[in-house]
Amino acid sequence: MNKTKDVFITGFALFSMFFGAGNLILPPFLGFKAGETWLMVTIGFVITAVIIPILGIVAHAKLQGTMYDFGKKVSPVFSVIYCFTVYGICLLLPGPRTASVTHEMAIAPFFNTSSLLTSTIYFILVFIFVMNRSQVLDLLGKYLTPIIIIILLAIIGIAVFSAPGVVQPTHFNTPLVDGILEGYQTFDAIAAMVVGAVLIISINLKNSSPTADKQRLIFKAGLVAGVGLFIIYTGLVLIGSLHNSEFPEDVSRSALLLGLGTKTLGTAGTSLLSILIALACFTTAVGIVTGTADYLKGLFHNSKTVYTITAIIGSVLGIVIGQFDVKFIIDVAIPALMFIYPITIILILLNVIPENWASVLVFRGTVITAFIFSIPDFLKILMPSEGLNAIIDTIPLGHYNLGWIFPSLITFVLLNLYTRFNPSTAS
């Protein structure tokens, strides 16, 4: 019984660390634009926002290390650069975005205060939680996550049964692809790399069980979190679709979610949803800052001073950037995601599959290929040009910002065939 309880507490804690700002405001808006194609959009969204992230947790359970271990087969230098890039992106974009969403949806509708005041108070609280990290799992798993899930399920359940019955046509030409790319904006695959390490360290602090038992605990907790994310995402996309005729076409992500809360739970809905938003965003911010502080602490011989300094820097960045508009932060994140997400997905998949299919040569070749073919998608957003578009259109799926998939897959297959016939080249 205690083991089952540990699995659910850890799974709920993991769910709450995944479930932040983007996870709340993106699915309803995706459903709103998808209309009758909501199911295809959901499938695409689930691939990059549930399946890949949970595989990341499974990889963490297998490695029992840090994010550095994901890329060390490519090279130690690459892995360090990758880690710094990911942690930097997390501190600069999804972390501060949680404060921005909290202000826009949980504070601004009720109080005439500045976003700077919100982000300041918010990240002071984040810092306090990060400095008391041994209690994070219990606090998240026992108390905060059940509240989040209950409020969300109430909104989804009522919205499904109170839908007007009229659904506007889809805005998407390729709903599956649009769902996949929108899943990037949740940062969940990147979050898996960050919070997975937090999870392992937190478990090790309070659990002296054998490694195999810890691996089973993390694996089962990952499944619990994955099922929870799948149910909530599907429900949020569905109600965004069912109620899309009740909102103007130019409705913002935040206004749509607040509107759905009010329609389903009445005047109390906005207040309940505000609590939900604040909790969901807060837990993610804690996970991001804690994960970054843990990584740098490990680089400097488990220095508590480095941990504290990193937590301070992460919180200050959150205060400064978190005062900006949500849409601005989302737009700024797109180029970074187009660049880092393909590499992250490849690293997760290579660390999940059996060792005999993931030699050093396969790691290096596949990751380098993903890196090269993600550059056009990155440049297309920063420096659009007809010449670049012409190149992208020659790459399979390039037109859909997924040009890295087939080249990476082909490289993976060819290098595995090569190492089968030349075993000495595998390492």
Image (tube, rainbow, N blue to C red):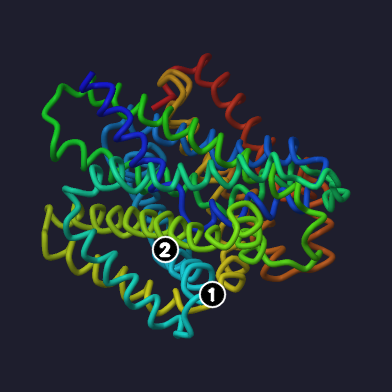
Residue 320, quarter of picture: bottom left
Tell me the amino acid under the disc marked 1: Pro
> Which is more toward the observer, 206 or 231?
231
Q: Position of residue 266 (x, y in %)?
A: 60, 58
Which of the two labelled residues, at mark 2 and mark 1, occupies the earlier sequence position?
2
Direction from residue 11 to residue 406 in the image, left or right:
right
Direction from residue 138 to residue 395 in the image, left or right:
right
- Are the residues at dot 2 and dot 1 in contact (C-beta closer than 8 Å)? no
* Residue drawn at the location 68% of the way across and 56% of the way down: 377
Q: Position of residue 129 (x, y in %)?
A: 23, 59
Residue neighbourhood size for the residue with mark 1, other residues' Cα within 10 Å, grouped as few (<14), some (14–19), many (≥20) = some
Tell me the amino acid under the disc marked 2: Gly
Tag 1 residue: 109
Q: Position of residue 390 (x, y in %)?
A: 84, 57
* Residue drawn at the location 58% of the way across and 47% of the way down: 155
Residue 68, quarter of picture: top left
Q: Is residue 145 above or below residue 21?
A: above
Residue neighbourhood size for the residue with mark 2, other residues' Cα within 10 Å, grouped as few (<14), some (14–19), many (≥20) = many
Q: Is residue 211 above or below residue 346?
A: above
Tag 2 residue: 95
Q: Is residue 38 above or below residue 379?
A: above
